[in-house]
Image (cartoon, grey):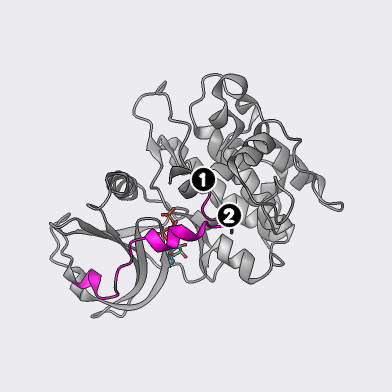
Amino acid sequence: LVRERRQSKLGLRLPEISDRRTRFPPTAPQQLKNTTNASTTSVADYETVQVLGHGNGGTVYKVVHKKTSNVFALKVVHANSDPVMRRQIFREMEILRRTDSPFVVKCHDIFEKPGGDIAILMEYMDVGTLDSLSKNTDGGIFTEHTLANVARQILNGLNYLHTHKIIHRDIKPANLLVNKNMDVKIADFGVSKIMYRTLEACNSYVGTCAYMSPERFDPDSYGANYNGYSGDIWSLGLTMLELYMGHFPLLPAGQKPDWAALMCAICFGEAPSLPEGVSEEFRSFIECCLQKDSGKRWTASQLLSHPFCRQPEN
Ligand SMILES: Nc1ncnc2c1ncn2[C@@H]1O[C@H](COP(=O)(O)OP(=O)(O)OP(=O)(O)O)[C@@H](O)[C@H]1O
């Protein structure tokens, strides 16, 4: 089950996952009350418009605030059904409550129900994820110029998170939300970690294994003093490459990403070859992100000064 979860969002979902996934009828949010702040709002103040998507532990709805007609996304998780889900949603709630950045999806409210359901009211990102955008447009919109804008925004988000000692641990196209202005925001903090102590060890084996850095498979060989921040940079590099190439870059297009193939490709494989015609700036940016030795990888703040990110926005 753990392996199946890690391999989700590769476009190769194992069929049983959707069968096991808890589904919430569109009426479910109506039962929830806000128990987290002094306001008297409840989920009953919002009308469900449509289902936006399903995660492993719940469902995300598009909702409209009845009085103001403002649109939001409402993520509802049945948190008492599974201790793992419960831990994930509480971690996500804690991080969303702490963060306030234009590059991280904004949480407006959290509603809890004594029975265990939790609903997180978030800003609505009307285009969806970078993964769905890439698939719906056949990857064609991701020119280097667009990718530089995307990379800059994700790096600003990562720089914010890392400065606040938060490691995301699951950066991938399916966890990056987009709106019609091409604003890109980091979402889904279910496996993220807050580093309370500077030298705290970081459990390396969480998140989606396809986007995991070499040191997360093998900390001894690739990451002395592994602390996790640089793992997010590896995942960003792979995400950029995937958007540019239109398929997961470490395996031939169409190859089933089983764990052994991924581990070999990530730890022992050559760096993926970029197509002819790629600019030196983009090639160098990818190299700075995909250094196998985590100590040689650039930080988010360094990458923001990389020539690839410093090209003019328009
Ligand atoms: N704020 C939002 N605005 C618009 N759509 C959203 C928003 N948040 C989530 N979605 C949509 O809902 C889907 C499910 O999101 P959710 O965070 O529950 O799960 P996930 O990231 O897909 O999976 P998991 O949490 O299991 O890793 C997303 O893939 C996205 O399409």
For the residue labelled by badge 1, is the local secondary structure a helix, a strand or a loop?
loop
Residue 62, image x, y percentages: 37, 73
Write the start and end of the magenta stretch as one range: 7-30
x%, y% of residue 167? 45, 38
Question: Which amino acid does the dot numbered 1 rest on?
Answer: Thr
Mark earlier in primary sequence (1, 2): 2
Residue in view at x 48 percent, y 31 percent = 204
Q: Is residue 18 magenta?
A: yes
Q: Which residue is mark 2?
A: 10
Q: As rendered, which of 263 and 273 lies closer to the eye? A: 263
Q: CA distance from mark 1 to mark 2?
A: 9 Å
Drawn side of residue 87 relative to residue 294, left or right: left
Which kind of residue does numbered mark 2 sit on?
Answer: Leu
- Residue at left offset 58%, top offset 39%: 233
Residue where numbered disc 1 is placed: 208
- Give the x, y percent position of residue 238: 64, 46
- Quadrant field for ligand 1: bottom left
The residue at 53%/57% (across/down) is 13
Dividing the image into 4 quarters, which one contains the C terminus? Answer: bottom right
Give the residue displayed 17% in from the left and 69% down from the top.
31
For residue 100, side relative to residue 114 (left or right): right
